[in-house]
Amino acid sequence: MQQIANLQRRFFNTHATRDVKFRRDALKKLRAALKEWEPRICDALQKDLGKCAMETFMTEIGMVTSSLNHTIRSLRGWSKPRRVHTPLAQFPSVSRVLPEPYGVALIMSPWNYPVLLCLDPLVAALSAGNCCVVKPSSMTPATSAVLAEMLGSLYPKEYVHVVLGGRDSTGVLLEQKFDYIFFTGSPTVGHIIMDAAARHLTPVTLELGGKSPCIVDASANLRVAARRIAFGKILNAGQTCVAPDYLFIHHSVKDAFVQEYRRAVTEMLGEEPLKNEEFTYIICKRHFDRLMELMQDATPVVGGKGDAATLRIEPTVLDDVTPSSASMQQEIFGPVLPILTWDKWDEVEQFVLSRPRPLASYLFSTDSANKKRFSQHLSFGGGCINDTIIHLAVHGLPFGGIGDSGMGSYHGKAGFDTFSHYKSVLSKANWLDLPFRYHPYSKWAEKILRLFLR
């Protein structure tokens, strides 16, 4: 691992990656490779997660391709030095901000979107001019192997290198000194990453998770709300860091919503969701058992069944839930949706603000006052009004958490910024050298200085 890091640092110090054409060519290679390798990526994701080809393209390959297209188009503009105002006291001089790469970056990706959450940060890091060591998840071995083979065929290891393996590989990687660490995963592992980074004073971006609330008020279009919330819980079987984690609904529309949710699930997956081959399964038996256990102290009013043989769980709505219920004690990360009710908006704010700040929040409402309160009073990484999940697909919206749900952001220009250090340079002319800043100081010099610095 140390040899790889040193090899990449030597290559970075040749300054080859600072050239914008070099970066754009590297990104174009990846874009072409994604099209060529799509069948193998689809096969691997089907083997690891049971993802169908449509969902693989929509949430993995298509998202990365879109990110690549946006970045390739925009990179020259992002990379240009930016001139800023220089105070009169520093005349004659010019001040500029120059984006420069950090150097050698470590990207650690999770299992739930093993292509998107590996390659999208890589796109950002390469666009900024970094060399990269990539560590995909060991829980999706087929997909990780395909990514390693694909990236190995595109780039020399001194530029991009993929490290496979489990916790032992991760531990050795974290002992090395990197110039930037980008991690997507659980808050528990996030603490470990940050602790390791602190030993080298390495800056980090942590994309974590949390319990993302989905708020529905009495004015919401319940048919649309149910379909869009069900989409957020069915997509990848709810194994999405920004999936609606619990439903906080106005008591007057709860029963009607449950009926609409049941109908939406049937329309999407049929009468027997467990037999639908296009419905993603739970990553492993341990997580399957954990999710089934979370339902034990509540009442399923939609779904509630699981199949241990296929690791599928029906899209489920849980009633008779309290803040102390098992499903409210941890991020669910599955197709299970507990329901809590409220009467006045103040209850919503008090409840949500009393908990760790989530990665996402959602509101379904046609009430302009509630929309304003949601946007201005609640704190969360990002979210939607009258939809779920899809804010991730907007390149101009930075994606990242706050507090317990993470730090830093990426997507589009925000990703370029994350992997760039903005270096300040003042360039001064020699033809004028104002004397008042030099010793010995005089009353005259003080008057001139005060005039300039007002």
Image: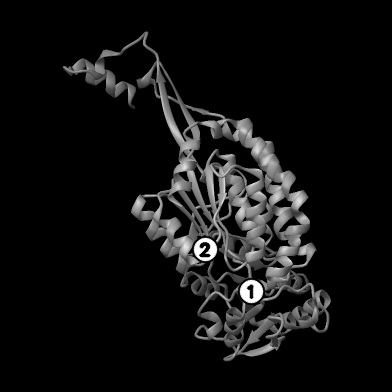
The residue wearing badge 1 is 283
Position of 288 with respect to 62 (left or right) is: left
Measuring from the top left, give residue 89's x and y in whole percent. 35, 21
Residue in the image at 21% along x and 15% along y: 444
Task: Indicate whether 231 appears above or below 317.
Answer: above
Dot placed on the residue nearer the N-terminal end, 1 or 2? 2
In the rendered image, the residue lying farthest to the front is: 3
Position of 43 with respect to 215 (left or right) is: right
- Pointer 2: residues within 10 angstroms few (<14), some, or many (20+)? many
The residue wearing badge 2 is 208
SS under mark 1: loop
Measuring from the top left, give residue 56's x and y in whole percent. 74, 61
Q: Quadrant of residue 334?
A: bottom right
Indicate the amino acid at tag 1. Ile
Measuring from the top left, give residue 308's x and y in whole percent. 68, 86
Residue in the image at 63% along x and 87% along y: 319
Task: Indicate whether 323 appears above or below 441.
Answer: below
Measuring from the top left, give residue 163's x and y in whole percent. 54, 56
